[in-house]
Image (spheres, grey):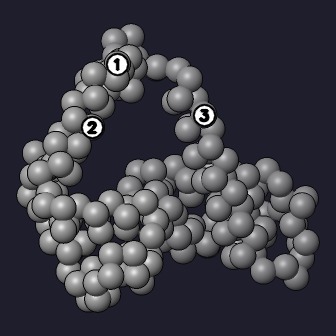
Amino acid sequence: MNRTKFNALVIQQADSLRLYARNFTKDHDDANDLVQDTLLKAVTYFKNFREGTNLKGWLYTIMKNTFINNYRRNTKSNSFITKEEEISPVNLVHSATKNQGENRFIMEDINSALSSLAEDYYTPFTMYYEGYKYHEISEHLNIPIGTVKTRIHVARKTMKKTLSAYKF
């Protein structure tokens, strides 16, 4: 197969490549860029294509690998470099240093909510949180397993209500 015929076959696949690219990018312009990069690589590496090979599958593989490599490259560069002269409010969260004060307040609120639970709810809830199974809690407290489940459920609801300020 000569280069001209190959290029024509590759160009014919552009529409299906564009649809496939939308699965990766979820954006029309980014999908077009990905298709363009894929077509450029396909034409550049024409010599690597073996006649009789599934052209569409070959192009899809190029596209998938291009997307993955670009994603890795962007992720790596974004984690090290701020590309703007001023830090945007979105990036400010990532660049700001954190102290443990905020976490300390949250833990105090959680401990306060736990301590406000009645003993009947506190013990099964904390045991479940520590990794005990329902039947182990039931045996330890000498109460039916259904009661254990109910008390854990009620404790969760109470904790959610008490800590509703932290709901996102």
Of residues 157 and 123, the one nearer the viewer is 123
**Quarter-wise, where is residue 118 in the image?**
bottom left
Q: Quadrant of the N terminus?
A: bottom right
**Quarter-wise, where is residue 8 in the image?**
bottom right
Label 1 is placed on what type of residue?
Asn
The image position of residue 12, as x and y in percent, is 61, 72
Question: Which residue: 55% across, 38% down?
Answer: 75
Q: Which residue sits furthest top?
A: 85
Tag of residue 76: 3
Q: Mark 1 points at which residue?
A: 99
Q: How far apart are marks 2 and 1 (CA)?
A: 14 Å
**Chain-order first, disc 3 or disc 2:** 3
Numbered disc in front, either 3 or 1 = 1
Q: Is mark 1 on a helix, strand or loop?
A: loop
- Asked whether the residues under the numbered discs 3 and 1 touch, taking CB atoms below 8 Å apart as contact, a structural biologist would say no
Question: Which residue: 89% across, 61% down?
Answer: 48
Of residues 101 and 81, the one nearer the viewer is 101
Asked if residue 71 can be seen in this view, the reply is yes
Q: In this view, does 7 lie to the left or right of 111?
A: right
Q: Is 44 drawn above or below residue 158 in the view shown?
A: above
Numbered disc in front, either 2 or 1 = 2
Question: Which residue: 19% across, 67% down?
Answer: 121
Q: Is 164 drawn above or below residue 120 in the view shown?
A: above
Label 2 is placed on what type of residue?
Met
Q: In this view, does 97 lie to the left or right of 163?
A: right
Numbered disc in front, either 3 or 2 = 2
Q: Mark 2 points at which residue?
A: 107
Q: Distance between the residues labelled 3 and 1?
A: 26 Å
The image position of residue 43, as x and y in percent, is 76, 55
Label 3 is placed on what type of residue?
Lys
